[in-house]
Amino acid sequence: MRRPEIAVALDLATPEDALALVAAIGDDASWYKVGSMLALSDGSALVRELVKRGKSVFLDLKWHDIPNTVAGAVASAAAVGASLATVHLAGGRRMLEAAAEGRGSSRLRLVGVGVLTSLDAAAFSRVVGRDVREVAEEQERLMELGLGVLDGFVAAPSETARVRRVAGESAFLVTPGIRPAGDSAGDHSRSATPAEAARAGSDLLVVGRPITEARDPGAVVRAIRAEIAAAD
């Protein structure tokens, strides 16, 4: 079984709030996810500060645009020191190839997003305008666009094992929608516990509100690690 890292989702209002949380967690977490909310609030400075503090930054902006624009965005992410970033698989093969070229010689890894964890089969059917029997099939169909181009994929827990089989052992798999045992799923339709995601083959577990809303966020991170270790 893999021993995935934990990425704390900094879905907070301001960079100051984010850095206060990072300070409270201390050495208990080394990965942090920066999404659209903070990216629009001096996000590049925040990423640089996190990198300066020795943290790995997962820049989750799900780029989906014309190839040239996405290539430029990826180059900017590499320049500020992000370790990982998302692109949307629905942008097509040409866009994904441009994204990969955009990172140049940097170590920035790119992972593809297919079906959001907030969508189930019925909701995704409305998005694509046809009946979807199984979300995992749609995830795999979209994922094929990024094979051989991207470093890995974002996959809901229920699809992670299937994505791992298709993408191979070297692919870097990111799993959102993680909720510690006993927690609410929130707005994720396809969530799982840390242990379940680890058994399915995830490399990076994204956890938000269970950590960010806790009185002792570092203790929650440690508890999640213990939950993974106990499942080994």
Image (cartoon, rainbow, N blue to C red):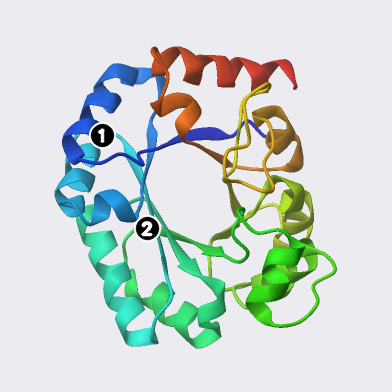
State the image quarter where residue 98 is shown.
bottom left
- In the picture provided, is 119 more to the left or to the right than 215? right
Residue at which label 2 appears: 108
Residue 121 appears in the picture as rendered: yes
Q: Which image quarter holds the N terminus?
A: top right
Q: Position of residue 25 (x, y in %)?
A: 34, 19
State the image quarter where residue 218 is shown.
top left
**Amino acid carrying mark 1 in the image:** Ala
Residue at which label 1 appears: 18
In this orientation, which residue lies closer to the viewer: 187 or 87?
Answer: 187
In this rendering, the answer to whether 158 lies above or below 140 is above
In this rendering, the answer to whether 160 lies above or below 66 is above
Q: Name the residue at 68% across, 74% down.
A: 126
Instruction: Report, in whole angstroms, how far the alpha carbon at label 2 lies from the one at label 1.
Output: 22 Å
**Amino acid carrying mark 2 in the image:** Leu
Q: Secondary structure at mark 2?
A: loop
Q: Name the residue at 65% across, 30% down.
A: 194
Question: Mark 2 or mark 1: which is in front?
Answer: 1
Q: Position of residue 142 (x, y in %)?
A: 66, 74
- In the picture provided, is 66 more to the left or to the right than 152? left
Q: Position of residue 173 (x, y in %)?
A: 60, 51
- In the picture provided, is 81 more to the left or to the right than 128? left
Q: Give neighbour class at mark 2: few <14, some 14-19, many 20+ (Cα, 10 Å).
A: many
Residue 104 appears in the picture as rendered: no
Q: Give neighbour class at mark 1: few <14, some 14-19, many 20+ (Cα, 10 Å).
A: many
Q: Secondary structure at mark 1?
A: helix
Q: Name the residue at 85% across, 69% down.
A: 133
Q: Position of residue 64 (x, y in %)?
A: 43, 76
In this orientation, which residue lies closer to the viewer: 185 or 73?
Answer: 185
Q: Which image quarter holds the C terminus?
A: top right
Q: Name the residue at 80% across, 72% down.
A: 132
